[in-house]
Amino acid sequence: MSDGLLEAYDLVKDFPLDRKRCVHAVGGVSLAVNAGETLAIVGESGCGKSTLGRLLIGALPPTSGEVRFRGHTITGLKEKDFSPYRRQLQLIFQDPYASLDPRMKVRDLIAEPLVTHKVCATKDEVTQRVLGLMESVGIPLDYLNRYPHQFSGGQRQRIGIARALALDPALIVCDEPVSALDVSVQNQILNLLNELQETRGLTYVFISHDLSVVRHISDRVCVMFLGKVMEVGPTEEVFHKARHPYTQFLLGSVLLPDPHQRGRQMRLLEGEPPSPVDPPSGCCFRTRCPYATELCARQEPALRKAGDAAVACHRLTE
Amino acid sequence: MLNSTLEVSHLCTSFFTDRGEVKAVDDVSLRVDKGQVVGIVGESGCGKSMVARSVMGLVKKPGKIVGGSIVLNGQELTSLDDKELCEVRGRDVSMVFQEPMTSLNPTMRVGRQVQEVVAIHEQVSKEQARQRTLEILSAVGIPEVEARYDAYPHELSGGLRQRVMIAMAMIMRPSLLIADEPTTALDATVEAQIIALLKRLAHTGTSVLIISHNLGVIAQLADYVYVMYAGRIVEKADVCELFDNPLHPYTHGLLGAVSSLRSQSKVLQTIPGVVPNLANLPAGCSFAPRCDRCMAACDSVRPELVTVGAGHELCCHLTKGVDVL
Amino acid sequence: MDPSTGFDVLPMAEDEPGHVPASAAFDRIAYVLRRLARDHKTAIVSAVVIVLFVLGAVFAPVLTPYDYNDINLSQRLSPPSLEHLFGTDEGGRDILTRMLYGSRVSLIIGVVPTLLSIAAGTLIGMVAGYVGGKVDTVIMRVADVVMSFPSMLLAMVVMYTLGDGTINVFFTMVLVGWAGIARVVRSETLKLKEREYVEAARIMGVRPTRIMLRHLLPNCLPTIIVLFTLEVPSSILTESGLSFLGMGVQPPNASWGLMVSAGRVFLYHAPWLCFAPCLAIMVIVLAFNYLGDGLRDVLDPHLQSQ
């Protein structure tokens, strides 16, 4: 894990509910993001993928564990010391309606990171940079002085991308960047992200619940369940040779856009999702797993190498 | 007994705003036969939800049904007053919404909420109503119904809440169930469960009108599909025919966008442009500005629905004289 | 232009029904007025009434031939007539004139302390809401203490300690008024703080002061405007009350509260002394309230739709 651009070691994040209880959003995640790749984090709502994304870029302080960027620890830094890393690590939000201040013009929205980090010497330079960014994400330059509500969802997402690119970051966490968009627009944004990655050598952490999007865009996939990594590996390997039962169920519940495949037996998950406040002992998936044994309740499985992937399941040793 | 459960013809629903009339639904005709699952597919803002709201009589001001007829089991709905509509809603036709989080009253136990529907439409004893509620709750696949009956909505997961909503919609055994994006807010594994449940309901003879932007949902569930764009039906066909042989450039683009995600190609297929604004539609075909096969006629003349095959109709100038695609 | 981005068919806001033209502040005001004219006619009437009162206060010397302190004992307590439209008081002074001059005091006292309390309350509330934690707890407990006293009683205590006079009235009213505003602004801030665009600014490393000024304040503004219109009448009432009790403006200066107070002795045989200032207080208070209601309806959904 030494060649990673960004490395996380045993990240834990608990959100206190009251004095006694807390939500275990992320429960000990270690992973590495390699330079230039797209690592997808998939899982269902409440599995902690968005929290993990924010922990990785230092937008949230972890309860324990640490994050290293190019070998430097960025966890627990003071605002002043963190500032240079902040420029390298950016985020694209899910909801293009909520993530842009409705009272700011496109110009000011994109310029805000430039002004904040005092990147440009003059106002003209700021405007030049903003225009350049608008061009690279495909917003016509004459819309410089428009407000966000004058744009459609896809166009707003482009503004959000331009803002994230403004500081020339090395890594961008994309938090469900296309799930609020229509199918036809979604593909435009995915193409744009791909193109930007090639021209700028970006590294993405792509958070999504949509497996077909993930399959298209990512090089590696990390499957999460209840704050823990279930399986992580190269995309094709995970999709073709899913080893963890949860990954198998997730893949099995994809609704194929093909009426001829209706007969295909869908694998339906039984039972209710466990609560992140009071997770089950041992393996957190065992309450819904058809293969669960007594060992699964007793001992938490560690991530173990299997082929090119790593899987956290006791069945693997058998 | 009539063969069609729902017959909508030439429905027009408009919104009257400061800036004039906005046609959310423009001359839409559709038909749901007994026991059939009919899908409406389209992107956000194409008016598909407004069709459902019109059928339910739930169009809110400044919107209004301005023309056409809606016939449910031989009864004309557009001429009914509010009170009569209330009787039809829930008994003959009911609806499941997208948001299972906000569609239930958070201060009421779920069992009571389901039971209330029975009390509104029929004179039954409390014990009978409770019995029927328990039956329907277990029929929609809710485990430990006795315990769930007394639960509050926030104590249930999203999937269970949507099941409660479906139970509420089905308790009067309506002949038509309208499901408006029933799985959009749910996780993939839960979505698959709900789709399986709706499939099962359709097998018991209930007609289902399913509205979705998700082609996967439509492909898995619907027998017959209407494609909507900018308030109008642009193509309708049997589900297999539509997916195998999409004729309208828009349908073609939508299916291409989805299938290219599954292919190995690096650059995804897209439909250029954005969904048009209903308040300011082009004079001719609404899809013309985004269409890669646009001709001179498309900009000025509005195409009409034309039959191109068995049960396959198309609203596109390409049908005229030219071999379609 | 790259066709795949689709900007050639961009639905621009001008085409959208019910959109808010935001290209200039002027457009926004025009939009608000248009909405008010359509859905809230009382608010428009109220705004006109308020403007008339302001004009009356500004042009008082032009509008009346008398001075507010022209004592004419031969005309004591004369009922309304063509010469004195609202009659005269116990010193033979023209009541209309005194009301016009009094409206200067009442309007200034209605508006200036309200502006000051809104400035103070907004600042305090925003800091409490954004910073949170102990700062929030301390500030809000202090606000609770202020609010737990009946405002009139508190104002009287402060006035008694400070002594009377216009500046002291200002001071007292700010001291009493900031707490309620701070509460509202704080809750608004707590709501806005969770918005993604504020999180986005934080992730970019924008400093808290800048977040408050650039993101929170502009988005709180509609609420603050409405608060203003609702606070002004209560300030006018507080001033009237204080003056009525003899703790506010001192004679021979005129203020509406003072006039009611002076006139109450003659309530039975010269009711016009109280009638006119009471009517004025009622009309201006109602006008501000109706305007506030209208603005709340127009500004709030517009914010949500964005």
Image (cartoon, coloured by chain):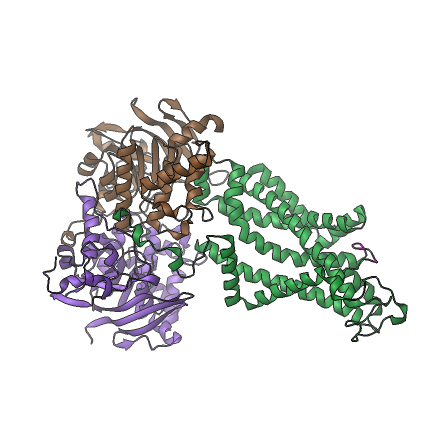
Chain colours: A brown, B purple, C green
Nearest the camera: C141 or C163?
C163
In percent of width and height, residue A252 lies at 21, 45
Question: Is C248 included in the stretch rendered in magenta?
Answer: yes
Residue lying furthest right? C74
Is residue B174 in sight in this rendering?
Answer: no
| B221 horizontally vs C211: left or right | left
Q: At 53% across and 41% down in the image, what residue appears?
A: C212
Q: Quarter-wise, where is residue A273 in the image?
A: top left
Quarter occupied by residue C83 = bottom right
Residue A28 image offset from top left, x and y in percent = 36, 31
- Front residue of B288/C225: it is B288
Is-magenta flag for residue A298? Answer: no
Left or right: B215, with A134 as reference point: left
User: Which residues, given as a range, are shown in magenta?
Assistant: C246-252
- Residue at x-position 23% and y-position 36%: A244
Q: How many marks?
A: 0
Query: Residue drawn 82% across and 63% down?
Result: C262
Along the viewing direction, whichever of B153 and A179 lies nearer the viewer: A179
Q: Position of residue A141 (x, y in %)?
A: 36, 45
Can the viewer see residue C238 in this picture? yes
Q: Is residue A113 left or right of residue B289?
A: right
Left or right for C106, reference A191: right
For residue C229, above or below residue A115: below
- State which quadrant residue C128 falls in: top right
Q: Position of residue A254 (x, y in %)?
A: 22, 47
Residue at point 66%, 43% (across, down) = C142
The residue nearer to you, when weighing A312 against B227, is B227
Question: Which SS type dominates the magenta stretch?
Answer: loop
